[in-house]
Amino acid sequence: MASVMNILGALAPVALLPAASLTSNTNGTGIDVSAYDGVALVTVDLVNTAGTNPTADVKLQHSDSSGSGYTDISGAAIAQVITASTSARSQIALDVSATKKYVRAVFTIGGTSSPAWTTSVLFIGAKKYQ
């Protein structure tokens, strides 16, 4: 039981996209993942609040610097969510040793009649050093 508590105590959640109502494409701010170890969990929560035929895509990108040069991380995306007036939750497992120093979330919105989503993307990883 003590080892489980040590692991849980080492977890450090960070918002890749803070909870917000989004009505346009949005890039999150890159976070430095070099202080993390192993596989992190990225949770994606989406609630559709408006629009006709609304769609939402979320993918992860990485870069060597925080401000530019981001490229997609292979396999680190959720399938397009197509839903009206409902919610969806997905998770992405991310091996931080296989990424560049900075990771960000990219949200892409689609649909007609002013689609809107309440969105949150959270990175949960274990810090290397406690």
Image: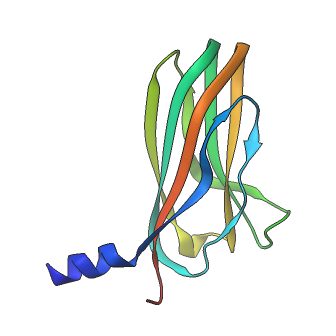
Which one is nearer the viewer's eye here, 114 or 96?
114
Which residue is drawn at the image coordinates 73% and 16% (left, top)? 114
Quadrant in which the N terminus appears: bottom left
Q: Position of residue 85 (x, y in %)?
A: 50, 16
Residue 98 quadrant:
bottom right
- Residue at image position (72%, 28%) is 23
Image: 87 above or below 96: above
Q: Which residue of the protein is positioned furthest toward the right in this rendering? A: 68
Q: Is residue 129 above or below residue 98?
A: below
Along the viewing direction, whichever of 51 and 21 lies nearer the viewer:
21
Give above or below for 33 relative to 122: below
Determine which quarter of the picture holds residue 96.
bottom right
Q: Is residue 19 left or right of residue 43?
A: right
The quarter of the rendered structure image containing the C terminus is: bottom left
Does residue 49 appear left or right of residue 9 in this picture? right
Q: How many marks?
A: 0
Closer-to-camera residue (75/115): 115
Considering only vertical position in the picture, is 97 above or below 129? above
The extreme front residue here reads 20
User: What residue is drawn where x is 70% and y is 29%?
Assistant: 109
Q: Residue furthest left?
A: 1
Left or right, 116 with respect to 47, comes to right
Residue at 55% x, 23% y is 48
Residue 73, how many percent across, how many down?
65, 56
Residue 37 placement (x, y as % from top left): 48, 79
Colour style of the rendered protein structure: rainbow
Q: Position of residue 6 (x, y in %)?
A: 28, 82
